[in-house]
Amino acid sequence: MSRTSERSGTAHDGPGPVLDVHGLVLRFGGITSLDGVSLRQQRGEILAVIGPNGAGKTSLFNCLTGVCRPQVGSVTLWGRDGRRTDLLGRRPHVISRLGVARTFQHIRLFPGLSALANVQIGVEARARPGVRRVPETLRVPETLRVMLATPGTRQQDAENARRSMELLSLVGLAHRAHVPAAALAYGEQRRLEIARALGTDPCLLLVDEPAAGANTVEKAEMAGLLRRVAADGISILLIEHDMGLVMTVASSVVVLNFGRVIAGGPPAQVQQDPAVLEAYLGTCAASPVPDGDGPG
C-alpha cells in the first residue's frame, strides 16, 4: 500500500469539491495580476491551469499558498476532515498544515542532502509526536526528548523513515534513497520534489510546470506519477505549458490570459476554443494549441 493511501481521514475518497476560488483580484501597484479569477475543483481531480507567460498562473498559486494576499475574492478549501476553511489571510505554514502542498517551477531541493533526507523534511513537517496530546505541564521539551532519545522519539523517527521510503517508492526513487539530490537526473529531481510535497500529507497538491525542461521519457514518467497520485485521492492543480502532458492527465482545464479566465472545460474542447487560440497563437485560425511547450 502506498503512503498516499494511508491518510488521516476519509475526506479524500468522497465526492464533492476540494477547492473553490471565487473572484480573485490581485494588484501590485498599478498592475493587475489576477482580475476576477474563479475556478472550482472536484476532489481527486487533476485540473490544469494553462496560459501564456504573464497570464497570472504563478500569482494564482501564490494566493492559494499564502505567499500573496489578493485584494478581493475568496478561497475555500475542503480539507482532510471535510471541513470548509477560508485560506485567505492565513500564513503559508498554516495553509500547509491544512492540506495544501506545492512544488515549484524552479526545483527547490536541498542539494547536499540525500533523496531520503529531502523527503523526511516534508514528512517531519507534518508529523507530530504523540507527546503533544499530553497536558502542557507534563510535556517533555522537544530538544530534551531528542537529546535523550526517548522511546517516543525513536518510534516517531522510525515511522518518518518508513513513510519517506514509501514515498520514494511511489515516485520510483527507492533505489536512489541515499544519493545526494544534486546527483540525481533532472527528471528524478522533479519526482523527488513531488515526494517531499506528498510527505506533508496534502489533500491538494499544486504542481508547477513539472514537464519544463524534461525529455520525452521524463514527461511520460511524470504523467504516470501524476495519475498515480490522483488515483490515491489527492487532488492536483497543475500549471503546465506542455499540452501533450495536459491532454494526457487532466480531466479539466482552465485557461488564463492577462489575469482573466478566458476558457474552461475538458482538454479537447479547450484546445479548440477560439479565445485560447487567440491567446496562444495571436490568431483565431482553426489550428490546435501546440502540443509541445507553449510560450514561456
Image (cartoon, rainbow, N blue to C red):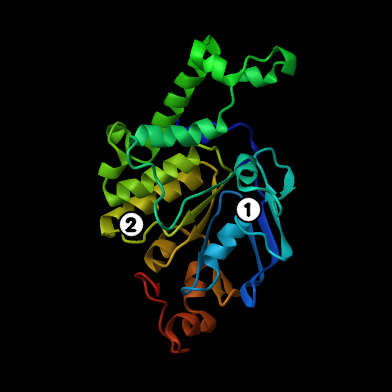
Q: Position of residue 274 (x, y in %)?
A: 52, 84
How much space separates mark 2 and mark 1, taking CA atoms? 29 Å
Residue flagged by tag 2: what amino acid is it? Lys
Mark 1 Cα shell of 10 Å, populated few (<14), some (14-19), many (≥20): some
Q: Residue at x 45, y 28 (%)?
A: 163
Residue depicted at x 52% and y 10%: 151
Q: Quadrant of residue 223?
A: bottom left
Where is residue 21? Give x, y as percent.
Answer: 67, 61
Closer-to-camera residue (272/216): 216
Q: Is residue 164 left or right of residue 235?
A: left
Where residue 219 is drawn, which disc sits there? 2
- Residue 68 percent across, percent down from the top left: 62, 59
Q: Say what secondary structure mark 2 lies in.
A: helix
Report crowding for label 2: few under 14, some 14 to 19, many 20 or more residues within 10 A (C-alpha): some
Question: Mark 2 and 1 residues: CB-CB less than 8 Å, in contact?
Answer: no
Residue 253 visible here = no
Which disc number belongs to residue 66?
A: 1
Residue lying at 39% horizontally and 30% vertically, measured from the top left: 165
**Badge count:** 2
Image: 126 above or below 290: above
Q: Amino acid at mark 1?
A: Gly
Q: Note whether residue 121 is visible.
A: yes
Whether residue 155 sits left or right of residue 94 in the image: it is: left
Q: Position of residue 278 (x, y in %)?
A: 49, 85
Q: On the picture, is 14 further left or further right than 125?
A: right
Dividing the image into 4 quarters, which one contains the C terminus?
A: bottom left
Q: Nearer the viewer, mark 2 or mark 1?
A: 1
Residue at image location 49% in from the left, 37% down from the top: 122
- In the picture, the quarter occupied by the N terminus is top left
